[in-house]
Structure formats: structure tokens, C-alpha cells
Image (tube, grey):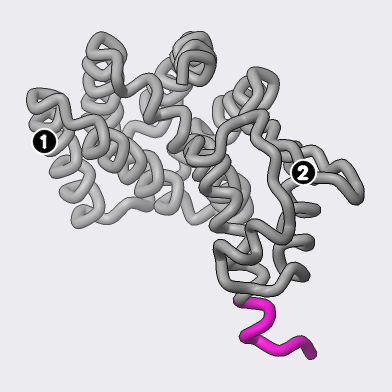
Amino acid sequence: MKRIENLSIRETVFQQIRQAILMQDIQPGEKLTEAEIAEQLGVSRTPVREALHKLEQENLVEIHPRRHCKVIGITPSAIREINMIRAQLEPTAARHATTRLSDHELNYIGGLLEKSRRHSDEADIKGLVEIHDQFHQTIVQGSNLPRITTILENMHEYIVSFRTSYMSRQELVQRSIEEHEAIYLALKNRDEDLVEELFKKHLEGIFEYEDVVIESNLTN
């Protein structure tokens, strides 16, 4: 058995570097070294080395042995692939959630929509991203489909980074809020077919958002 604290350090190092890349605190093209990261995080080089190898498996970095590690970041192909996965899995999860969400959870979703309108009026992008995220997560988790939920949760930070880009476009924000409101009404009516149909249409829009995200990444 491995020591819990050592496992925790390795996972923490991995998550910190991964999040910094996904949120573009570390930019594509930057060169990373084990020694520099280890010093910044106050850890040994071993968990950093392991983290970088895991990140290479996600195609977020490219390791050049005995030299450095080059950050790749989120590529257009990664955006497309993740959106394809979401478009296939989330409508199914939403359909299953329709008859499983409690009245309390539905009221919570309704409250999120009210908050999203306020954040939109105030041009609060951070607040909009958080509410949008909670809306989708509540429905997916309410599906009681643990494997699908896990797959989508593993892509969570990627998805949040996409949302930050297109939530800066007011026309896309309004469209998204209106689609969320339609989904909410269908959920309240426990209409599985309509919920699935609306979710499919909602997620068709994410393919249109790809150009927005790519453009944003290129200009940052």
C-alpha cells in the first residue's frame, strides 16, 4: 500500500499544473522544467515528473527528455473531440435525470436561472460561468448514471475553460440562458422526450462556439 500523503502530493501537483494550463495561466508554447516547478510548488522533482508524464498522456504538454517540457494547451482538435463527447452523453444523462431530480433540485435549478439573468445584466462573466457550470452539473449528477457522470466530470476543467471564452459574447449568453429556461420547464413537466430533444439542440450550439473559443485562445 502506498502512503496516503505521498499520493495526495502527487495528485495535488498534477491538478495544479493541469488547471494552470487549462485556464491559460501557463500559455501554449511555454517551456517548463521539473526543477523550476518543484521550487515554485515547494515539492521534490519526483511528483512534478510524474505529473508532466500524465499531462503528456492528455496531450497538454510535450516532453523533450533531458531538456524541457513544452506546453501544448487546448488545441482545436481537443475542443472538437470534447464537444463531440458532450453532445453524445449529456442528452442521455438529462433524459434520465428528468424523472429522478427531486423537487428541491428543480427549485435549485430554477434559482440558478434567476441568478444567470442577474449576472447577464451585470456583465459578470465569472458569475455566468459558475452558474452555467452548476446548471449542467446538477442535471448530469441527477441522472444517477455514475459512469457517464465520471466521464463528463473528468472533462470538467476543459469545459469551464471553453465557457469562459464564449460567455464574453452577449448574444451567446442570451441564447444559452433562453435554452436553459426551456430545458428547465421541460424538466418541471417531467417530459423525458422533450428534455432530451432540447438538450441535443442546446449542445449543437457548442460546435458553433468552437470558433469563438479558438479565436479567443489565439488572441490571448
Left or right of residue 66: residue 116: left
Majority secondary structure of the magenta segment? helix
Tell me where residue 105 appears, x and y as whole percent. 25, 53
Check if residue 7 falls in the magenta segment: yes
Q: Is 71 or 193 nearer to us in this picture?
A: 71
Asked if residue 197 is positioned above or below residue 25 in the image, the reply reads: above
- Residue 204 visible in the displayed image: no
Q: Quadrant of residue 63?
A: top right
Which dot marks residue 69? 2
Q: Nearer the viewer, residue 53 or 97?
A: 53
Structural crowding at the residue carrying mark 2, measured as other residues with C-alpha within 10 Å and reported as few (<14), some (14–19) or many (≥20): many
Q: Are marks 2 and 1 in contact (CB under 8 Å)?
A: no
In the picture, which quadrant includes the N terminus? bottom right
Q: Which mark is residue 47?
A: none
**According to the image, label 1 marks what residue?**
114
Instruction: Residue at 67% x, 70% y: name it.
Output: 10
Q: Earlier in the sequence, mark 2 or mark 1?
A: 2
Report crowding for label 1: few under 14, some 14 to 19, many 20 or more residues within 10 A (C-alpha).
few
Determine the CA span between mark 2 and mark 1.
44 Å
Residue at position x 80%, y 45% in the image: 68
Image side of residue 46 versus residue 136, left or right: right
Could you say where residue 196 lies in the image, as x and y percent from the top left?
44, 27
Look at label 2 and name its amino acid. Answer: Cys
Q: Residue 100: x percent and y percent?
A: 38, 52
Residue 98 among magenta residues: no
Over which residues does the magenta segment extend? 1-8
Q: Nearer the viewer, mark 2 or mark 1?
A: 2
103 or 210: nearer the viewer: 210
**Residue 38 at least partly seen:** yes
* Element class at badge 2: strand
